[in-house]
Image: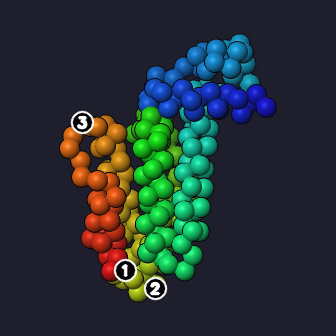
Amino acid sequence: MLREEIVTAAVRMLEELGDDEALSLRAVAREVSIAATSVYLYFPDRDALVLAAMQRCHEELVRGGDEAEQAHEGDPAAQLRSRTLAQAEWAQAHPGLYKVLHESKVHRRLGMPFKEVLIGRTRAAVQRCMDAGVATPGDAAIVTIDFRTAVNGLLSQRINEPDLDWPPALEQIDRFLTKLVGLK
């Protein structure tokens, strides 16, 4: 399917570029060996293509978190931790895509409503920890925002400033789980 080939090429190029503004429809068309005008049959503009590429990445990120969580059925704290570690591993494996997903101009202009799925999954995992008594009771939505802000900051900082002497990500995530989520 040509649309999928175009999205695949865009994902590959965005991974290398790490910047949605640097992606051109002409370059994507060249990568897929089609005329530049053919891209417009599937995407009205570059932003629409970037959003399609980021939606695919987001689905991969959600799927990875879901699979990691399933490995710890019955242990809500381990589920939340494994979901978070899966996100961190994906970001480390795909720093360019992570930047576009969280720092892109398309994101700032249009938003990425599909990201609500990951937020919802994290909120549900936090709520399960609270319900099981393994985390401090509170407003799971607020705790999730605080926790995701910290984790996204950790990941973005490592991507944007890789030469700094960072503590191990796993240790930092565990501190966030303890201090922000209140895991016991």
Q: Position of residue 53 (x, y in %)?
A: 59, 37
- Foreground disc of the pair 1, 3: 3
Q: What's the CA distance linking mark 2 and mark 3?
A: 40 Å
Q: Which residue is mark 1?
A: 135
Q: Residue at x 62, y 27 (%)?
A: 9
Q: What's the CA distance linking mark 1 and mark 3?
A: 34 Å
Q: Which residue is mark 3?
A: 163
- Viewer-proximal residue among 169 and 109: 169
Q: Residue at x 72, y 15 (%)?
A: 34
Q: Residue at x 60, y 50 (%)?
A: 59
- Are the residues tagged 1 and 2 within 8 Å (C-beta)? yes
On screen, residue 27 above or below 98: above
Give the structural element (helix, strand or loop) at label 1: loop
**Farthest left residue?**
165
Q: Which residue is mark 2?
A: 132
Assess disc 3: are there few (<14), some (14-19) or many (≥20) residues with their C-alpha within 10 Å of its C-alpha. Answer: few
Q: Position of residue 152 (x, y in %)?
A: 37, 51
Report if residue 17 is visible in the image.
yes
Q: Amino acid at mark 2?
A: Ala
Quadrant that contains the C terminus: bottom left
Direction from residue 146 to residue 28 in the image, left or right:
right
Give the structural element (helix, strand or loop) at label 3: loop
Q: What's the CA distance linking mark 1 and mark 2?
A: 8 Å
Q: Position of residue 129 (x, y in %)?
A: 44, 78
Assess disc 1: are there few (<14), some (14-19) or many (≥20) residues with their C-alpha within 10 Å of its C-alpha. Answer: many
Report if residue 113 is visible in the image.
no
- Viewer-proximal residue among 82 and 102: 82
Direction from residue 48 to residue 142 in the image, left or right:
left
Q: Position of residue 164 (x, y in %)?
A: 21, 40
Give the structural element (helix, strand or loop) at label 2: loop
- Foreground disc of the pair 2, 3: 3
